[in-house]
Image (cartoon, rainbow, N blue to C red):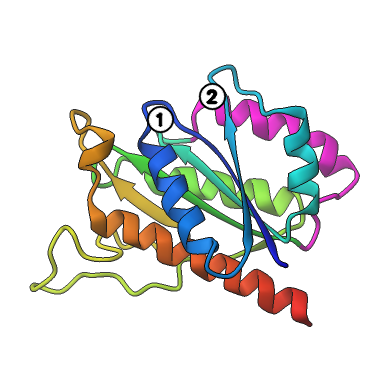
């Protein structure tokens, strides 16, 4: 069965909830392994084996000060060991992020994740979702934040994890499903 690994850091729980939504979507077409980068920027030793055996790796980080969290960056720097041996070459890659502001420079975070994937010689998968950008659109619509490069969510700074919008979470689910389906399609070739 196709395997999707989701490696993410979450500072306050919002990105964790988004990672779970990505995992729920990916589980429609793959075996999913969620790997959380801890508060010190580390992952368990066994996580590296999960990443090595995955057909697709989805990266997730909150957007802090216009890029990934320092904890995610520490994980990314530690990935130089698999990079040196090109262990992730030709795997699918994708990414997601959350921040409090509607823009909040989330695209800079996704660009960082794309660059990380390109360093590893991976193949990037975008959302494949049209934006909800008509006058009739509401904030709770799918892909209201209008990202093509990866899934984005906006959660106000004073909102709890439970207050995340269903539209953003459904966007993450559809994104996860797309990544898993594309990984299965590539593995079948």
Q: Nearer the viewer, residue 104 or 137?
A: 137
Q: Position of residue 166 (x, y in %)?
A: 25, 55
In this figure, which residue is indicated by the disc labeled 1? Answer: 64
Asked whether residue 27 appears in the rendered view, the answer is yes
Q: Nearer the viewer, residue 51 or 153?
A: 51
Mark 1 surroundings: few (<14), some (14-19) or many (≥20) residues within 10 A: some
Residue 83 falls within the magenta-colored stretch: yes
Examine the image and state in which quarter residue 45 appears: top right
Label drawn at residue 54: none
Mark 2 surroundings: few (<14), some (14-19) or many (≥20) residues within 10 A: some
In this figure, which residue is indicated by the disc labeled 2? Answer: 70
Residue in the picture at 71% in, 28% down: 44
Mark sitting earlier along the chain (2/1): 1
Rendered position, 24 above or below 181: above
Q: Position of residue 43 (x, y in %)?
A: 67, 28
Q: What's drawn in magenta, residue-wise?
A: 68-90
């Amino acid at each position: 069965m196709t395997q999707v690994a989701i490696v993410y850091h979450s500072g306050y729980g919002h990105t964790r909830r988004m990672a779970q939504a990505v995992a729920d979507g990916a589980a429609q077409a793959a075996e999913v392994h969620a790997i959380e980068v801890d508060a010190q920027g580390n992952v368990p030793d066994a996580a590296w084996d999960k990443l090595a055996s995955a057909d697709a790796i989805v990266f997730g980080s909150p957007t802090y000060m216009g890029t990934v969290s320092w904890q995610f960056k520490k994980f990314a720097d530690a990935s130089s060991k698999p990079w040196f041996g090109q262990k992730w070459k030709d795997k699918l890659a994708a990414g997601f992020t959350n921040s409090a502001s509607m823009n909040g420079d989330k695209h800079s975070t996704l660009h960082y994740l794309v660059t990380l994937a390109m360093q590893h010689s991976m193949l990037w998968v975008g959302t494949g979702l049209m934006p909800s950008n008509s006058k009739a659109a509401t904030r709770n619509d799918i892909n209201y934040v209008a990202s093509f490069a990866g899934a984005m969510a906006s959660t106000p700074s004073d909102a709890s994890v439970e207050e995340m919008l269903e539209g953003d979470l459904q966007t993450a689910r559809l994104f996860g499903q797309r990544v898993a389906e594309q990984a299965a399609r590539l593995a079948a070739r």
